Image: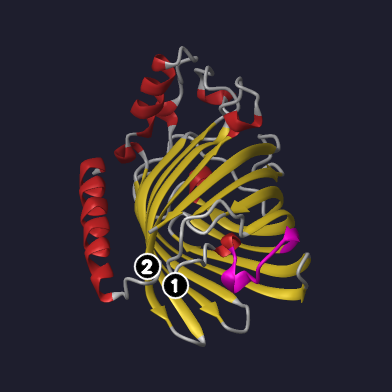
């Protein structure tokens, strides 16, 4: 399964790059994005819990740079790992959340409207469970870096396919050159993630509108210029939000497939706060974002992690 997903990802990337021949060469027409999530980035190296790791390499292509709506298509590889508070626990009775691992691909279409609104629609296909081989991968990593060996992957969420539709919508409420308040809405439906989140996004600093900002990675379509060290954007942002969870298969097990050896009931309401900093140059973006999430099941505790995003345009 893992080899098939990697092979498919290579085919998608290759066909996407070849397709750029149809896009005028005077414009920035595609980019490569990498997002890495990890609780180790909180500077507490003892942490390796809950949403333990996320790795997301992505290729994005300019499809249409129309006057009213700009369209960008993307293909992303998803690598997610979930563990209990302490990976050294051996008995299932000790686990405060199930182990779970996901390997998948997401195809998405992004719409940048002239009215300064943004919409992203994505479809994720892949695998949750032992077939994703996350237990073997984490055991190997921990051995390489001299960390405690995880003991509970035999109790992980059982095999189930990942078929998930996601929507992300951004709309400004108040905008100025140095300050902006926006509404951000997220919806996810499928075999694994079923939730709706509403957040408030507050940005301050050297800003560009959402439909032209590094926040939405919207620089594709700009004319190629000389490579200069000039910063296009530099700002801070804060985003409080509330999430309603209908079903989370990484906690409760999947709708499809065998029964999982260990599951817990997901908490319906989850509070999330994000705070970050964004740097953007003509060809490159860099951001650091810290997440604080209230506990997702009664047995667990609240959690925090850091996401690093890098985006290189061509």
Picture disc at residue 221: 1
Camera-side residue of 160 and 71: 71
Camera-side residue of 150 and 96: 150
The quadrant the C terminus occupies is: bottom left
Q: Is residue 70 above or below residue 48?
A: below
Would you identify the image quadrant in which residue 39 lies? top right
Q: Residue at x 67, y 38 (%)?
A: 304
Q: Is residue 240 above or below residue 45?
A: below
Picture disc at residue 29: 2
Q: Residue at x 49, y 15 (%)?
A: 147
Q: Is residue 79 above or below residue 314?
A: above
Q: Residue at x 37, y 67 (%)?
A: 29
- Residue segment shown in magenta: 200-213
Q: Residue at x 66, y 68 (%)?
A: 208
Picture disc at residue 176: none
Could you tell me residue 200's position as x and y percent?
Answer: 74, 63
Describe the element under mark 1 as helix, strand or loop. Answer: loop
> In the image, is 122 to the left or to the right of 276?
left
């Amino acid at each position: 399964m893992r080899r098939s997903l990697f092979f498919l990802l290579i085919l998608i990337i290759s066909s996407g790059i070849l397709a750029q021949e149809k896009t005028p060469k005077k414009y920035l027409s595609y980019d490569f994005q990498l997002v890495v999530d990890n609780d180790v980035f909180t500077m507490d190296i003892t942490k390796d819990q809950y949403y333990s790791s996320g790795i997301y390499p992505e290729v994005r292509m300019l499809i249409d740079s129309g006057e009213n709506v700009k369209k960008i298509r993307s293909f992303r590889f998803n690598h997610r790992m979930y563990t209990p508070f302490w990976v050294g626990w051996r008995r299932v009775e000790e686990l405060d959340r199930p182990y779970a691992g996901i390997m998948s691909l997401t195809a998405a279409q992004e719409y940048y409207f002239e009215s300064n609104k943004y919409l992203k629609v994505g479809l994720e296909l892949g695998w949750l469970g032992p077939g994703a081989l996350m237990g073997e991968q984490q055991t190997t990593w921990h051995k390489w870096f001299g960390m405690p060996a995880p003991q509970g992957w035999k109790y992980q969420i059982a095999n189930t396919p990942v078929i998930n539709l996601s929507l992300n919508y951004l709309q400004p409420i108040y905008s100025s050159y140095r300050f902006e308040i926006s509404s951000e809405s997220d919806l996810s439906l499928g075999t694994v993630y079923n939730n709706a989140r509403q957040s408030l996004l507050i940005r301050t600093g050297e800003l560009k509108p959402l439909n032209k900002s590094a926040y939405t990675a919207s620089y594709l379509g700009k004319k190629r210029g000389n490579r200069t060290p000039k910063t296009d954007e530099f700002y801070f942002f804060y985003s409080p939000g509330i999430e309603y969870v209908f079903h989370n298969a990484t906690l409760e097990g999947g709708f499809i497939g065998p029964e999982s050896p260990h599951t817990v009931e997901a908490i319906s309401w989850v509070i999330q706060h994000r705070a970050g900093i964004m740097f953007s140059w003509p060809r490159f973006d860099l951001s650091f974002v810290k997440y604080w999430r209230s506990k997702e099941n009664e047995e667990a505790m609240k959690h925090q992690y850091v996401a690093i995003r890098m985006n290189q345009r061509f």
